[in-house]
Amino acid sequence: ALRQSVTPKAQKEKQRSWNHVQPQASYKVAVLGAAGGIGQPLSLLIKMSPLVSSLHLYDIANVKGVVADLSHCNTPAQVSDFTGASELANSLKGVDVVVIPAGIPRRPGMTRDDLFSINANIVTALIEAVADNCPDAFIHIISNPINSTVPIAAEVLKQKGVYDPKKLFGVTTLDVVRANTFVAQKKNLRLIDVDVPVIGGHAGITILPLLSKTKPSTTFTDEEVQELTVRIQNAGTEVVEAKAGAGSATLSMAYAGARFVESSLRALDGDADVYECSYVQSDLTELPFFASRVKLGRKGVEALISSDLQGLTEYEQKALEALKPQLKASIEKGIAYAQKQT
Ligand code: NAI
């Protein structure tokens, strides 16, 4: 009898009440490149969000199985599959947030810039479809090299006459996630408390963690700053080398990408206290695109947080000046590529 009291009926009740406490929000999210190393775990994490009612998964192949599999999870989001260019437009109709992890990843010995020609092509085609089908959506670009693919996306959107700089984001959340993890480990802090802003871009020395702005306030020796900065900048390569030819970060990227989606949905839903670092159009420096903390709101970027750039240490100031020429070149390369396409 005791055993019976916790069997199906009670379990069903529990399940039902769990489903009932979900917020009423109902946003549509599309993942382009959903069958890939990042796309699959990212889609799983988005499927778990109570803010999502509809999840559209698009890829050039292998997406049917991913959707069949995910659709068995008893969370509210309805998952649908879209395969190949002929189904791309439908995957984007009515979507609030589009996440783009489509493209090839690095192998050992490659820089993110080595991915340029292939991924620039992929991003261009996908953004053209976004412009035609859901020009008001938040666009999250994961495909590398982000330093160039975001400027390419901006150009494509401009050519289509629908560019809204407040809604185009390069996803740099993984740099923040890594910085938080490494700093917490090094300084024996509670992971959940640690927040390190990371500015600049998303490749090598353009990734600049502002350790002096770490929350909670933490002091670092010069050696610790040097060691942590270099580790955060090379963390992607750490994974590429450990995977030894099988690709780059996928699980930690999915985690970071899902966090950025969740933050965007909370902002769309009216939460007035959402801040994330992201690589966006910016006037914080002389560069047209720059990663910094941004305040997110219903219409996208509500404010760029300039205070992080004030009172930098000498080390950070020098690193900022050093990254600018490299980031500038990557931005110009992206813009030149996009302008050549027309
Ligand atoms: P993957 O090769 O495992 O998956 C890529 C997926 O994109 C595949 O399923 C492929 O079929 C799909 N795809 C290719 N062309 C497409 C197109 N035209 N339309 C739709 N889908 C297409 O690669 P992975 O590991 O998932 O990485 C994806 C991208 O994310 C790479 O460019 C990688 O460099 C980047 N990345 C970015 C990070 C960041 O912090 N922003 C971190 C890690 C990776």
Image (cartoon, rainbow, N blue to C red):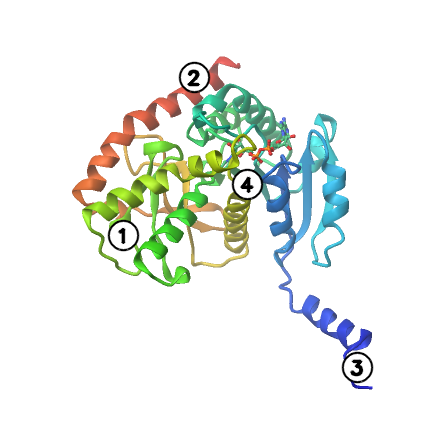
Of circles 1 and 2, the one toward us is 1
Label 1 crowd (10 A; few <14 / some 14-19 / many >=20): many
Identify which residue, 121 or 314, lies in the foreground: 314
Does the rendering let one see residue 235? Answer: yes
Position in image of residue 65 (x %, y %):
76, 40
Q: Residues within 10 Å of mark 3 (few under 14, many from 20)?
A: few
Q: What residue sits right under mark 4 in the picture?
A: 250
Camera-near label (2 vs 4) is: 4
Regarding ligand 1, which quadrant of the image does it lie in?
Answer: top right
State the separation of the CA atoms marked 1 and 3: 54 Å
Q: CA distance from mark 2 to mark 4?
A: 29 Å
> For the residues marked 4 and 3, what is the alpha-carbon distance in whole angstroms?
42 Å
Q: Quadrant of residue 2?
A: bottom right
* Residue type at numbered disc 4: Thr
Residue type beneath disc 1: Lys
Residue 220: image x %, image y %?
Answer: 22, 52
| Nearest to N terminus: mark 2 or mark 4 | 4
- What's the mark number on residue 213? 1
Q: Is mark 4 within 8 Å of ligand 1?
A: yes
Q: Closer to the camera: disc 1 or disc 3?
A: 3
The quarter of the picture where residue 214 lies is: bottom left
According to the picture, the residue beneath numbered tag 2 turns out to be 336
Mark 2 residue CB less than 8 A from any atom of ligand 1: no
Q: What amino acid is at disc 3?
A: Arg
Q: Which residue is mark 3?
A: 3
How much space separates mark 4 and mark 1, taking CA atoms?
A: 28 Å
Q: Which mark is residue 109?
A: none
- Residue at the limit of the structure toward the bottom, as seen here: 1
| Tag 1 and tag 2, C-beta contact below 8 Å | no
**Tags 2 and 3 touching, CB below 8 Å:** no
